[in-house]
Image: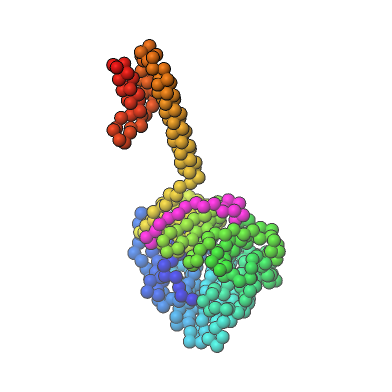
Amino acid sequence: MKINKNEYKLIDRKNEGIWNFYIKDNSIYYKIINCDICEEETKLIDDVKNYDINIDSENHIHLICVTYNGEFYYFVYSNDKWKKTIIEEYDPELNSIDYLDIIIIEKVIHVFYSFRNVINKNLANVVHYIYDDKWKVNYLETVELLDTEIKAYFVDYHPHGDIFLLFKEEKEVYLRIFELSSKTWKELKIIECSVNDIDIINFYIDNNYNINLIYKNNTTTTHTVNNSGDISNYDKWSKNIIVKEIEDINSLIFEVDTKLYIIWKNEEYLYCKYSDDFGMSWIEDKKFKYDSMCNIHYIGKEYKNTKLLKYINTFGNVKYNEISLAGIDDNLLFCTKIEENNSYDEELVDENNESEEKESLEFDENNSYDKEIIDESNNNEEDIDEDLEKIIDDVNFFRCDIEEPISPKNNETLLQKIGKYFNDKKEG
């Protein structure tokens, strides 16, 4: 797997600042952002193929990485220094470690990765290392991949400690759960969540123990959630189409304050949706036009005074000592928020149109009244002299209240013509 070089992994160490890790020239660098100060970057290790990072309850940073030379390293930062050990070494010409994940629960370190051999590149072994005073290894599954570029597994956890491992083999989607209480893996289960031909994009366990999947089928990207506990029942899954378009999109999901967010982007725009009923329904929230955008994985107890139960996986930007995260921050660096017309604006437009139509109708009615005046006057020419003053007063009354239309031929208004007509009659 190619490492995402357009990604920042942010570790919030409270009073010791936010540590920003990133890849540059196949090397891991980091900068420390502390208040208004952003320190110079520091190189940690060269020739990195992939890595992941986390923090424990004592503020120690834990980092795992694989090099192109075949070393599988584990780093820990404590007491102001890094300590490095080798978990494994392998021949990179014959074998490959592709995906890495590190999860820390109650000071116990869990490391996951997929391992392939060049003899059969379509078989990936999913391996689980667990460290509690010493390293122990579990060889969990062998997954047959239809495409070697497809991720062999997805892993996530509940804040209370259970770990969920998901993978797809041929047309079936499987799930295994590591129980914190027993420290053992439960039996494999099949997920009956949708049609068979899907590509899984993302996987997330929310605070309510719901299983959230984002997957793509043909051109439709769909979110599906199971909050019943019965993952084997197709009817127990609630599905919502996130976007229906031909182009590929990268969808990320996270939870803050019991509200779920799905963030995705195409080549031009960034979109945000949120759900306040644990994924049963989604509300369109924000749309941004962006100049630059990075994947950001934020780990900490809080973000800008907002308490966090888990990490935030979203898009955003980091510039010197400024951080902006899509879904949480209204103002994003290098982005312009797109304000779209809502139904309330449309109602105002409709009301204005109705008002204009009403005014037009009233004006036509007044014109018809003027016409009646003319007709009636023509039928009673002998009484014109007696009623002329009254009629002209009426005309002046209407002239005050009506915006008079102008004839395109001679620029005379209708009421001007009426007054001229009676004046001519009087003089005659």
Assess whether residue 135 is covered by the magenta stretch: no
Colour scheme used in the picture? rainbow
Foreground pick, 428 / 251: 428
Q: Residue at x 36, y 54 (%)?
A: 36
In-image side of 249 versus 207 (left or right): left
Q: Is residue 105 above or below residue 358?
A: below
Residue 135 seen in the current view: no
Assess whether residue 281 is covered by the magenta stretch: yes
Q: Residue at x 52, y 72 (%)?
A: 100
Q: Where does the magenta region start and end?
A: 275-292
The image position of residue 409, as x and y in percent, is 30, 35
Q: Residue at x 63, y 71 (%)?
A: 196
Foreground pick, 246 / 226: 246
The image position of residue 60, as x and y in percent, is 49, 64
The image position of residue 110, as x and y in percent, is 57, 69
Q: Is residue 270 above or below residue 63?
A: above
The image position of residue 404, as x and y in percent, is 36, 29
The image quarter containing residue 255 is bottom right
| Numbered label tally | 0
Residue 417 seen in the current view: yes
Foreground pick, 195 / 167: 195
Quadrant location, the C terminus: top left
Q: Is residue 402 above or below residue 176?
A: above
Q: Residue at x 54, y 52 (%)?
A: 283
